[in-house]
């Protein structure tokens, strides 16, 4: 008897405030035309001053729990993937646990930047497959607007805020997470990072004067590595399950840049219709991008029972990975 983790509920939350490309034109030297052509992004959502990662996560989690037909007391564990936690500690997951009243759960955060959701899903899957736990809540939440340099046109046009959540349940049927494939390469840690605010450059004058609390990125290099690594992890997931790209109903990639997704489609010979895309409305929401896209794909009726779907992500670390799911 094989135990698998089945996704029984999904939910997502996007802050209300919309920041359009036209709005950005008033903030930095850019244009709607440039942003749409180079990234595919038209607008993104921005959290309010008093909204933090745990708030977004909580709203998404509430919806996923309701959608899954369970209650907070059924949840054995909560994993929150984020690199923009409310505070250094306690974990965002413990704050979400408190808001949900999920007293029986243990909770922790996981840091893998934009790959965070795939990493967290994989960890959750191991707990459930081992038979140790039955029900898990996995959340991707990020509030990049608070670590973005709003004077840097190279980065500020790309990111948005959001959260997505799934409830996983132990199941012995054919549906569930079939396999996950994770990769890291610390040699390129400085391709995409936030230098300040940790124990290397603590909050203080040096950090503020040198704007080290903000995201730094080598965009061009990141672009190429993102295409190559996501293709590698997709191929790995297909190969290890004896499948081809033809067997996948829907690809749900990390939503960083439309041109990255188009390049992946071209390399794998998969038409764009089989990719879930919502970055035009939300930009890159980091760890939240895949669970938000998954939630929307389900609600749009793009996934049916028995379909194979493939999630793939790339992010700072560097980290990347894929997860094959039979719905
Ligand atoms: N508006 C107008 N011009 C801009 C601009 C903006 N927002 N940002 C950069 N430019 C300019 C550059 O200064 C450069 O000008 P120059 O030729 O005079 O030097 C020119 O546009 C081309 O810059 P380049 O960096 O080569 O553009 P690009 O086509 O690579 O697009 C990114 C830049 C950032 C959109 C693209 O590299 C990208 O998306 N990279 C991946 C980033 C990512 O996904 N990160 C998260 C991973 S999880």
Image (cartoon, grey):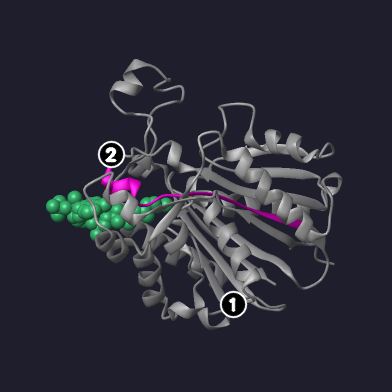
The residue that appears at 70% across and 38% down in the rendered structure is: 96
Image mark count: 2
Q: Is residue 126 visible?
A: no
**Residue count near mark 1 (Cα–Cα under 10 Å), binned few <14, some 14–19, many ≥20:** few
The image quadrant where one finds the C terminus is bottom right
Mark 2 lies on residue: 151
Q: Nearer the viewer, residue 236 or 20?
A: 20
Secondary structure beneath disc 1?
A: loop
Residue mark closest to the camera, 1 vs 2: 2
Label number found at residue 47: none
Q: Quadrant of residue 209?
A: top left
The residue that appears at 26% across and 63% down in the rendered structure is: 33
Q: Earlier in the sequence, mark 1 or mark 2?
A: 2
Report x, y in % for residue 5: 75, 60
Q: Quadrant of residue 302?
A: bottom right
Report x, y in % for residue 185: 42, 47
Magenta stretch encompasses residue 244: no
**Residue count near mark 2 (Cα–Cα under 10 Å), binned few <14, some 14–19, many ≥20:** few
Which residue of the protein is positioned furthest toward the left in this rendering?
Answer: 29
Magenta stretch encompasses residue 162: yes
Q: In the picture shown, does residue 253 fall above or below 142?
A: below
The residue that appears at 74% across and 37% down in the rendered structure is: 99
Report whether 78 appears left or right of 222.
right
Q: In the picture shown, does residue 8 fall above or below 120?
A: below
Q: CA distance from mark 1 to mark 2?
A: 48 Å
Report whether 27 appears left or right of 235.
left
Query: Where is ligand 1, by quadrant?
Result: bottom left
The image quadrant where one finds the N terminus is bottom right
Q: Is residue 229 visible?
A: yes
Q: Which residues are magenta?
A: 151-168
Mark 1 lies on residue: 242
Secondary structure beneath disc 2?
A: loop
């Amino acid at each position: 008897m094989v135990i698998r983790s089945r996704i029984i509920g999904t939910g997502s939350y996007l802050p209300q405030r919309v920041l359009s490309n036209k709005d950005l034109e008033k903030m930095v030297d850019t244009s709607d035309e440039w942003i749409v052509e180079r990234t595919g992004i038209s607008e993104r959502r921005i959290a309010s001053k008093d909204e933090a990662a745990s708030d977004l996560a909580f709203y998404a989690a509430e919806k996923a729990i309701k959608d899954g037909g369970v209650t907070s007391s059924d949840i054995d564990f909560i994993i929150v993937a984020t690199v923009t936690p409310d505070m250094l500690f306690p974990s965002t997951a413990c704050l979400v646990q408190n808001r949900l009243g999920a007293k029986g759960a243990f909770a922790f955060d996981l840091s893998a930047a934009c790959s965070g959701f795939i990493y967290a899903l994989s960890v959750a899957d191991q707990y459930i497959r081992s038979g140790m736990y039955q029900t898990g809540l996995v959340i991707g939440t990020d509030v990049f607007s608070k670590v973005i340099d709003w004077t840097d046109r190279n980065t500020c046009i790309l990111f948005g805020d959001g959260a997505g959540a799934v409830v996983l349940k132990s199941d012995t049927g054919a549906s569930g997470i079939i396999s996950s494939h994770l990769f890291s390469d610390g040699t390129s840690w400085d391709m995409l990072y936030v230098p300040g605010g940790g124990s290397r450059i603590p909050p203080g004058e040096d950090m503020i004067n040198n704007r080290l609390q903000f995201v730094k990125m080598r965009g061009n290099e990141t672009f190429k590595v993102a295409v190559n690594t996501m293709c590698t992890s997709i191929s790995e997931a297909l190969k290890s399950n004896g499948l081809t790209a033809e067997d996948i109903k829907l690809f749900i990639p990390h939503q960083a840049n439309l041109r990255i997704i188009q390049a992946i489609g071209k390399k794998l010979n998969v038409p764009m219709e089989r990719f879930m895309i919502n970055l035009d409305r939300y930009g890159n929401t980091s760890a939240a991008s895949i669970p938000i896209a998954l939630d929307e794909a389900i609600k749009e009726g793009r996934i049916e029972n028995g379909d194979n779907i493939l999630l793939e992500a790339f992010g700072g670390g560097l980290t990347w990975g894929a997860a094959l799911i039979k719905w």
